[in-house]
Amino acid sequence: MNGHHNSEGLPTVPVIDFGPWDNSDKQEERLKVARELTAACRNVGFVQIINHGLPDDVLQEAFAWSKKLFDLPMEQKMLAPHPDGPNVHRGYSYPGLEKVGQVNGTNGDDSKAEEALRQVTDCKESYEIGSSECEEQPNVWLPEDVLPGYRDFMSSFYWRCDAIAKSLLRAMTLDYLKSTMHRVTLPPLSDRFVGDQRITRERYSIPYFVAPDSDAVVECLPSCMGEGNPAKYEPVNWASYRRMRAKLQYQSQPATVEA
């Protein structure tokens, strides 16, 4: 694991070689990886994984497909529209449709917090896919003739990421491991403006979010609490929590009435 604090005493993102976890038959080497990963999540909340099993050429191909997708004309991208409202998080979201933010201290019913969050528009677009086995979140695919090969590649890519994610999962108990806010930082200063337009160049990211089954109850493990060390949070149903968070991201559009 490389990196702890920079010259200013601020934590840096640790880099962990995950290769021994998958490739070593020595328990001590696997245990070393597990300890480094746990320490990174405990002390920083972010970690960079190398030798994770996803080849660079596959990652490059995934970003190439992303560029092809977002380079399509708007009318073609809208052939796979994000469903109205917050319940299904799939398909294409045009700039301004989704609002990503962190609202602390709200139970999701605070309309003022939602309104304040949406005062600033997110100038980004996204395309969401997920497990083909999730009936509650059906994928919304582009027609094959619009971007031939995209669905096949991204479906395969999703399941490759799923296999890696299962190797990385660790229990999150009693705030021992940090749950750090997901955010995108500013690009390097040298890459921040283009000509006289003073706009950033295209930036692509492919996050893979891991979530429980919809009927799962997230709660503290009995072995991780006890007398003098009670659970910090009440049990929560994942589907209910996801819907609460999604209300802050997507609002239902008012129905249009044709004269």
Image (spheres, helix red, strand yellow):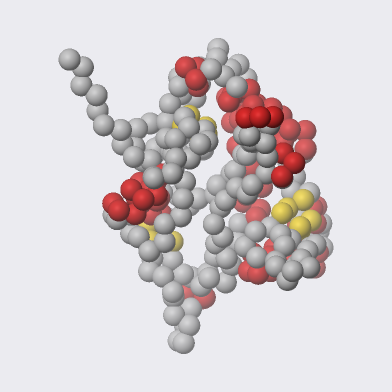
Q: How many marks?
A: 0
Residue reaching furthest top? 145
State the image quarter where residue 33 is shown: bottom right
Identify the residue at horizontal 55%, vertical 12% (top origin). 145
Residue 83 locus on image (x, y percent) = 38, 31
Residue 159 locus on image (x, y percent) = 61, 38
Between 204 and 82, the residue placed more toward the observer is 204
Residue 19 locus on image (x, y percent) = 79, 53
Residue reaching furthest left? 259
Position of residue 188 in the picture relative to residue 233 (left or right): right
Residue reaching furthest front? 196
Quadrant that contains the N terminus: bottom right
Position of residue 198 in the picture relative to residue 83 (left or right): right
Quadrant that contains the C terminus: top left
Asked whether residue 23 is in view, the answer is: yes
Position of residue 181 in the picture relative to residue 98 (left or right): right
- Establish if 77 lies above or below 55: above
Between 205 and 145, the residue placed more toward the observer is 205
State the image quarter where residue 103 is shown: bottom left
Identify the residue at horizontal 46%, vertical 55% (top origin). 102
Between 166 and 126, the residue placed more toward the observer is 126
Asked whether residue 138 is in view, the answer is: no
Residue reaching furthest bottom? 228
Between 254 and 18, the residue placed more toward the observer is 254
